[in-house]
Amino acid sequence: MRETFSIGELSRQADVKVVTIRYYEQIGLLPRCERTPGNYRVYSHTHLERLSFVRRCRDLGFTLEQVRELLHLSTTTARTCADVCDLATEHLKDVEARIDDLQRLASELRQISESCNGKRSLLDCRIMAALSKPSVAR
């Protein structure tokens, strides 16, 4: 196993863009790395593990603040798994609410798309008319 990585190698290993790695360093999600005498960044396997964890959290839709909390929980032995479970449960509620919103959106788009035969003039387009209506409060 390699002991150190350049930023490009870390980027490829974790499948994260270089600019994202720099950003995560800037906001403290990823610890600062060592620098070579030529001022190049040098990352350790620990950086790769942490970056992979952050990437997986982001893939699951956790916010940066939630990721920060999960990272904090992972280093705090005084807390229990219940804290992580609570955070995940809260995130699940948010995801399910977004799914509900997207299902309502899909239904509305399906309905207005089905009302269009594509043969009317743009002035008589039912999709444009539906989009021009004020939205209904959720």
Image (cartoon, rainbow, N blue to C red):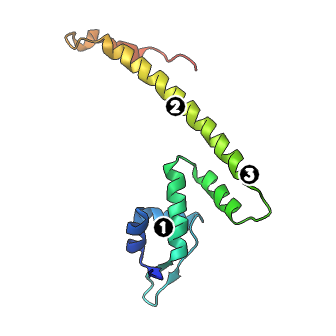
Q: Which residue is mark 1?
A: 22
Label 1: how many residues lie within 10 Å, few (<14), some (14-19) or many (20+)?
some
Q: Looking at numbered disc 2 in the image, what kind of residue is underneath it?
A: Ile
- Disc 3/disc 1 C-alpha distance (Å): 29 Å
Say which residue label 2 marks: 99
Front-lying residue, 136 or 52: 52
Q: Which residue is mark 3?
A: 83
Q: Residues within 10 Å of mark 2 (few under 14, many from 20)?
A: few
Q: Are marks 1 and 2 in contact (CB under 8 Å)?
A: no
1 or 2: tag closer to the N-terminus: 1
Determine whether 52 is above or below 9 in the image. above
Q: Residue at x 22, y 14 (%)?
A: 118
Q: Residue at x 52, y 27 (%)?
A: 101
Count of labels in the image: 3
Q: Quadrant of the N terminus?
A: bottom left
- Amino acid type assigned to the residue bearing label 3 in the image: Asp
Residue nearest the observer in this picture, 127 or 102: 102
Q: Quadrant of the C terminus?
A: top right
